[in-house]
Image: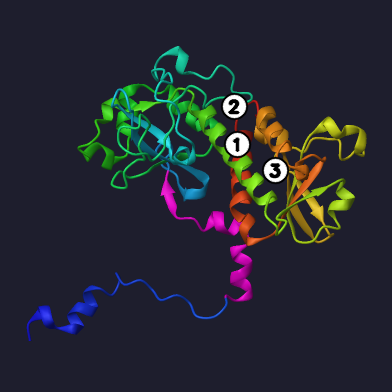
Amino acid sequence: MSPLMDPKLDAARNRFKTRKPEANGKPSEFQAKLRKNPYAQAIASPVRSCMLTEARIPAYFLIDFGLARHPKTGKPWQLPKLAIDRNTISPDAKYPDAKSPDAKSPDAKDAGANVHSNLPDVQETSEGSGAYSQPARAVASEYILSQRPALSLVSQINERTFVRMTEARWKTDGRFNCEEIVWRQDMESFVAGLMRKKCVSLLKYLSGQPAAYIAACDSYEGLQKKHQSGAALWLGKQYQHDLSAAEGVAPSPYAMLQYKSSTYIPLYNMPVLLGNECLDQLRGSGTVFQGPLAVIKHKRNTVNLQLLLWKLMGYLSSGADGA
């Protein structure tokens, strides 16, 4: 029999290419708990290598970058994949050169409130629309630690070192010249802005769902009466007159709150995480965020939001100013 017709040979060749069948029946109790656990999901993400430190850690603790071609100059820009979700900007918007002083963010303290107003963004659009195109799948991602000092350090290295550190597959890809890759000098503020905008979007969406994934809360004592709480949001000191002495103190980074005597949940300082402008947008989106506290329910549909909040907190707290 010809090898081309041998079913055993064909099965051996495709043994590891065939997709595994879906598991039958409901997941076990342990599997259901893992799916709702954001920390387990973070640790279980694929291991990737940081281009700056060469550390191999779960991809959740890294920021993945891709290449997008500038609609006017045609030069490749290295931008975070987070930017793909953002809206396109006007083709007439100003695009400062990455090495010019105008490209730097004037104030990183409240980054994210206005960093998108006059700087290029990434969006998948039709040809000739005047906006950036989504990075091609053939171009491998490049990962950098999800920390502000790491991105700031990349902005300070010289061009020769930057090219040497570039992803190997980018160097062999004929569509891009690595020596022409543009890195934004305000990248640390730009990434913070993207993460903040995405947090606001997810919070607005989940708070508007009938399943009540996010609930308002008046006090820490009232929070103990909430069922299935996964995280708490501290919304600011403007409600100081309604809070007790303990509730009026802003939480520190990685603060934990005791919940029902046997569990601890994270307590996020939203004025620090979102900045003033994004927080005002959130408060104006509904009554859920107009009180002193809010609670995120421990549900599978809130896992992505909890992952993003935890990542944003780690990203901002790694900076010198903490915001």
Labels 1 and 2 touching (C-beta < 8 A):
yes
Residue 43 x %, y %: 54, 55
- In the picture of the structure, the residue carrying the numbered disc 1 is 196
SS at circle 2: loop
Quote the CA–CA distance across marks 1 and 3.
17 Å
**Label at residue 254:** 3
Q: Is residue 188 left or right of residue 254?
A: left
**Rendered image quadrant of residue 8:** bottom left
Q: Residue at x 44, y 44 (%)?
A: 55
User: For the view shown, which residue lies furthest in the top direction?
Assistant: 101
Q: Earlier in the sequence, mark 1 or mark 3?
A: 1
Whole-number angstrom distance, CA of label 2 to CA of label 3: 20 Å
Secondary structure state at the residue bearing disc 3: loop
Instruction: Tell me the residue at 45%/75% (across/down).
Output: 22
Hey, what amino acid is under mark 3? Tyr
Q: In the rendered view, does 291 fall on the left or right side of 108?
A: right
Residue 35: give x, y in percent of width and height: 59, 64
Residue 111 badge: 2
For the C terminus, the quadrant is top right
Helix, strand, or loop for circle 1?
helix
The residue stretch that appears in magenta:
27-49
